[in-house]
Image: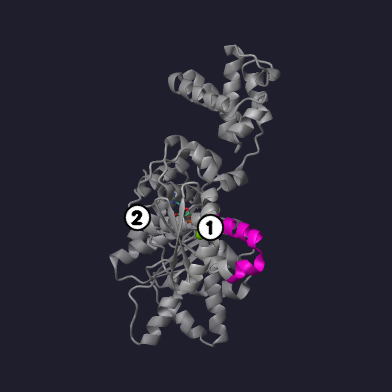
């Protein structure tokens, strides 16, 4: 039941590429600042913005010809060397003149860099969520399109990967999109943890309904609802606001938990809610908890919210994470080996947004530098993300468990003995160390009696080969892995 991902967004990929470069650039800027001093940096270098990479050349922009020539003369070589040190695939720097307005300021780029791992946030959505716009007067049209947030074009049913944890919520969402306002499905209340697809499903409902035409859909976060409401009170236009809200066919409010403790806004929402449902319109609401667990919500609102269909999205399973990664990798056109997908699905279990962010970064790197995605490259490119997700299994723990499992002495993990009875468990421990920690080959080597990194690489490959040939052995290793992971 895996949805296709034809809609994979080239824009999202380009953004991911940009943020990868931005990460490198912000590091280079730090070094430049340290080398040339703050004043020099501010005068000449701060105005540089990063352009595209083509083959082994990166383009950097400066706002004027004068600056470009000066920077080229004074810092050209240094910039080239720093880029090469940061990204070995880059060997040349091309300096060009570009109007600053066309490019983000370096500080903005650096900010983007620090936010890069979470780059999955909806970017520049394009489809307005209110359609058709009633165009009685220009002003009215404006207010109306301001009523709702735009829909993210990437979030459709086609791009939603279905598995056990979300199949019920998915089925309910589809049902509402096909036949809004059916009894039993109004309101539809979707709940689940962060990054599990609630917003995606709501936008998918909206997109599907808009495709059918003739329906007005308003989607907004509860937070936006509140600000709009407060704004309306301030400008004494609450009646207008109410009328607008009550004129839509489908109202979707995302992250309702935000209204907890905001009594006036809850009150307003309650009345809007009743008016719409009574008029046969559809309401879709999401929250991080079920209606009964949303403490702080008014009882009457809680009761009404639970009256329709309540569907939860459970935490992802390993299988679902793999399906999602497979679909997204396939849609990107970059070949990502199964081993890498499994590694990611094992490592990043918290939510789909982070999983997606990690994969996007890998794909951006592969496209940017034209290098194949390997496990090694993955560990390198995603070092910071993986570190945050490290389950903190230590190499010592791995060695102990593996030695126990094969009844060998722990000291044989470090000893120079080479018989197969001691060498095999040692290789398995090396393999697991590579899989379960973010340590590099040389680091692992040091923990195994100061062995060379090539010995570790050989051991890891050997275990992979054996696992492919011998299912019983593979099962043993998998069992060990699972024991160590929990
Ligand atoms: P929530 O609103 O529950 O916090 P989102 O709907 O924003 O989560 O999802 C976070 C990211 O993960 C989005 O980019 C979304 O497309 C993606 N995502 C979540 N679940 C799935 C899924 N089942 N299939 C494909 N993408 C998913
Ligand atoms: Mg959300």
Q: Is residue 250 magenta?
A: no
- Percent across and percent down for residue 172 are 41, 54
Residue with the mark numbered 1: 79
Colour scheme of this structure image?
one colour
Task: Tell me the quadrant of the picture where the N terminus can be found.
Answer: top left
Mark 2: which secondary structure? loop
Q: Around disc 1, counting alpha carbons within 10 Å, would you say few (fewer than 14), some (14 to 19), or many (20 or more)?
A: many
Q: Which residue sits furthest right?
A: 411
In the image, is 106 to the left or to the right of 135?
right
Residue at image location 66% in from the left, 21% down from the top: 413
Which badge, 1 or 2, comes first in the chain's sequence?
A: 2
Residue with the mark numbered 2: 7
Residue nearer the viewer, 104 or 114: 104
Q: In the displayed structure, would residue 137 be above or below residue 363?
A: below
Mark 1: which secondary structure? helix
Residue at image location 66% in from the left, 64% down from the top: 37
Q: Is residue 41 magenta?
A: yes
Q: Which region is colored magenta?
A: 22-43
Whether residue 312 is visible here, answered yes or no, is yes
In the image, is 29 to the left or to the right of 8?
right
Q: In the displayed structure, would residue 180 be above or below residue 90?
A: below
- Percent across and percent down for residue 198 are 48, 56
Residue at image location 54% in from the left, 22% down from the top: 476
């Amino acid at each position: 039941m895996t949805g296709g991902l034809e809609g994979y967004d080239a824009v999202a990929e380009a953004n991911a590429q940009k943020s990868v470069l931005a990460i490198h650039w912000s590091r280079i800027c730090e070094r430049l600042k340290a080398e040339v001093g703050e004043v020099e940096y501010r005068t000449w270098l701060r105005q540089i913005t990063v352009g595209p990479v083509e083959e082994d050349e990166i383009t950097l922009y400066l706002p004027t010809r004068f600056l470009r020539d000066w920077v080229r003369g004074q810092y050209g070589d240094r910039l080239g060397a720093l880029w090469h040190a940061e990204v070995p695939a880059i060997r040349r720097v091309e300096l060009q003149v570009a109007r600053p307005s066309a490019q983000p300021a370096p500080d903005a780029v650096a900010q983007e860099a620090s936010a890069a791992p979470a780059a999955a946030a909806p970017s520049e959505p394009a489809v307005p969520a209110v359609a058709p716009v009633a165009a009685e007067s220009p002003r009215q049209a404006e207010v109306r399109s301001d009523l709702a947030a735009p829909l993210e074009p990437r979030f459709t049913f086609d791009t939603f990967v279905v598995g056990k944890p979300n199949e019920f919520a998915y089925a309910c969402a589809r049902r509402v999109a096909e036949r809004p306002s059916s009894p039993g499905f109004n309101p539809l209340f979707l709940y689940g943890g962060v990054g599990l697809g609630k917003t995606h499903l709501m936008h998918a409902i909206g997109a599907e309904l808009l495709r059918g035409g003739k329906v007005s859909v308003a989607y907004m976060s509860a937070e936006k609802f509140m600000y709009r409401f407060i704004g309306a009170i301030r400008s004494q236009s609450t009646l207008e606001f109410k009328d607008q809200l009550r004129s839509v066919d489908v109202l979707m409010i995302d992250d309702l938990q935000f209204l907890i403790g905001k009594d006036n806004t809850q009150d307003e929402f309650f009345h809007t809610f009743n008016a719409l449902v009574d008029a046969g319109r559809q309401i879709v609401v999401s929250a991080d908890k079920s209606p009964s667990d949303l403490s702080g919500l008014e009882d009457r609102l809680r009761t009404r919210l639970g009256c329709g269909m309540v569907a939860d999205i459970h935490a992802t399973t390993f299988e679902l994470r793999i399906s999602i990664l497979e679909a997204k990798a396939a849609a990107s056109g970059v070949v990502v080996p199964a081993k890498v997908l499994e590694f990611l699905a094992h490592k990043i279990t918290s939510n789909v947004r982070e999983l997606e962010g990690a994969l996007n970064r890998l794909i951006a790197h592969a496209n940017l530098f034209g290098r194949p995605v390997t496990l090694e490259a993955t560990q390198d490119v995603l070092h910071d993300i993986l570190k945050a997700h490290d389950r903190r299994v230590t190499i010592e723990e791995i060695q102990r468990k593996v030695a126990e499992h094969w009844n060998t002495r722990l000291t044989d993990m470090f000893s120079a003995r080479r018989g197969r009875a001691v060498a095999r468990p040692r290789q398995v421990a090396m393999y697991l160390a590579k899989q379960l920690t973010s340590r590099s080959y040389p680091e692992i080597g040091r923990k195994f009696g100061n062995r060379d990194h090539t010995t570790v690489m050989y051991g890891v490959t050997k275990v992979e080969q054996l696992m492919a040939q011998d299912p019983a052995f593979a099962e043993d290793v998998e069992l060990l892995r699972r024991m160590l992971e929990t």
